[in-house]
Amino acid sequence: MRFLAWLVLGLLVVWAIRSKIKASAIRTENAEVPRLDEPELMVQCIHCGVHFPASEALSQAGMLFCSEEHRRLHFSS
């Protein structure tokens, strides 16, 4: 009977420790998610049609390009 009581007590301790570790891991996982203040505007390359962040755009004559090569190719043809 004592053995059974010790076994139950041990299982309860193991269960409590595991649930505490799991809760801590979930909190840590949620804390590491980066938050963006605002989504960045996406624009489309006039040459290839790919969408990309506006902060990376190259502009010429009011048109937006995803790379220097596409800007050059568009005006060379």
Image (spheres, rainbow, N blue to C red):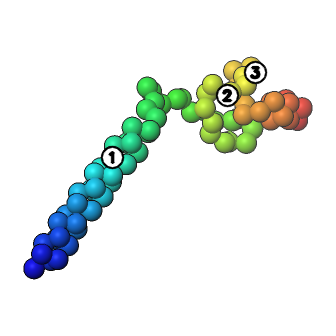
Give the residue number, with chain letter if any, for mark 2. Answer: 56
Mark 3–mark 2 CB contact (< 8 Å): no
The answer to which image quadrant residue 56 occupies is: top right
User: The residue under label 2 is which amino acid type?
Assistant: Glu
Instruction: Please determine whether, in this image, residue 61 is positioned above or below residue 2.
Output: above
Q: Given this view, does label 2 or label 1 mark the residue nearer the observer?
A: 1
In x, y percent, where is residue 37?
43, 26
In x, y percent, where is residue 42?
57, 33
Q: SS for tag 2?
A: helix
Viewer-closest of 31 and 68? 31
At x 72%, y 34%, the residue is: 66
Viewer-closest of 8 and 66? 8
Q: CA distance from mark 2 to mark 1?
A: 39 Å
The answer to which image quadrant residue 29 occupies is: top left
Q: Mark 1 or mark 3, which has the lower sequence index? A: 1
Q: Given this view, does label 1 or label 3 mark the residue nearer the observer?
A: 1
In x, y percent, where is residue 47?
75, 38
- For the C terminus, give its image quadrant: top right
Give the residue number, with chain letter if any, for mark 3. Answer: 60
At x 63%, y 25%, the residue is: 55
